[in-house]
Image (cartoon, rainbow, N blue to C red):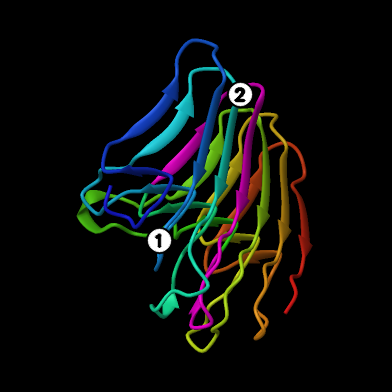
Amino acid sequence: GNLGNSGVDLECNAFISAGGSGTLTVNGTGGGNGGLNCGVIVYGNPNGQDPYITSNGGSITINGTGGGSSSSVSAGPCKNDGIRLENGGYILGPGTGQLTLNGTGGIGSPAQHTICGVYVGPYAAKGSAGLYETRISSLGADILINGTGGKGGAVNSGGYNSGVANYGLIKAGGNGKLTINGTGGRSPYGYNQGVLVSGIATFNSVTSPATVTSLGGDV
C-alpha cells in the first residue's frame, strides 16, 4: 500500500474475509518513522473502491498497534493509530458471535498529534459516486471495541489522542450489543479523550442499549 508503514494496509477494493463459519483474526503492528504507521488501516477512495474486513458467519477479532517514533522530524497529525477506517473503508461483523476490535495508538514526536486507538472517519457525502459510509457494523453479532490512545505532543492544530474517535457510524444490528471502552492517550496539552464523538457520528445498537465507557488520559 501507500500509507506509511502500516502493519495491515487495505486500499481500493482489497478485502479480508473468512469463508464458511470460520473465525477471522487480523493482527497488525505499525512501524517506521513519520506518520500513517497504523497497526491496521482500511482506506477507501472517492471512486467507490471501498476495502473491507468481514466473515461469512464466524466471529472476527482485529488487533492493531500503531507505530511511529518520538524522534520523528515531521509535524502535525501523524495518524499512527491502532486501527483506522477512512474514506469508505468498513468492517462488517456476522449475524452471530462477536466482532472485537482492540486498538492501541502508537507514538509521535513532540510536534505530532492525532494518535488514536480506534479511529472511524466521517460517514460523509462522496459526490456522484455515493457515500463514504465509513463504518463498523454487524448483522446481529455483538460488537466490542477497546481503544487506547497513543502518545504525542502538539495540540495547536486541534489534535487529539483519543482511545476511540468516531466521526462515522458504529452500529450493532439485529440483537447485537454494542460495547465501547476508550482510554485516552498522553499529551502535555490535554485532548486525551477516552471516547470522542464528532459531527454526525453515531453509536447505535438496534435492540439493546449501547454501553460506552470513557476514561481520560494523562499528560
Task: Kindly identify which numbered label has been placed on residue 59.
Answer: 2
Which residue is nearer to you in this view: 51 or 40? 40
Which residue is nearer to you in this view: 66 or 130? 66
Which residue reaches farthest front?
Answer: 71
Assess disc 2: are there few (<14), some (14-19) or many (≥20) residues with their C-alpha within 10 Å of its C-alpha: many
What residue range appears in magenta?
89-115
Quarter residue 194 falls in: bottom right
Label 2 sits on what residue type? Ser
Where is residue 143 shown, x and y percent of the image? 66, 37
Where is residue 41 shown, x and y percent of the image? 43, 48
In-image side of 21 versus 215 (left or right) = left
Q: Residue at (52%, 58%) from the top-left corner?
A: 81
Decide: is 144 above or below 184: above
Residue on which disc 1 sits: 36
Q: Residue at (47%, 85%) from the top-left corner?
A: 157
Label 1 sits on what residue type? Leu
Check residue 103 for magenta coloring: yes
Decide: is 212 above or below 75: above
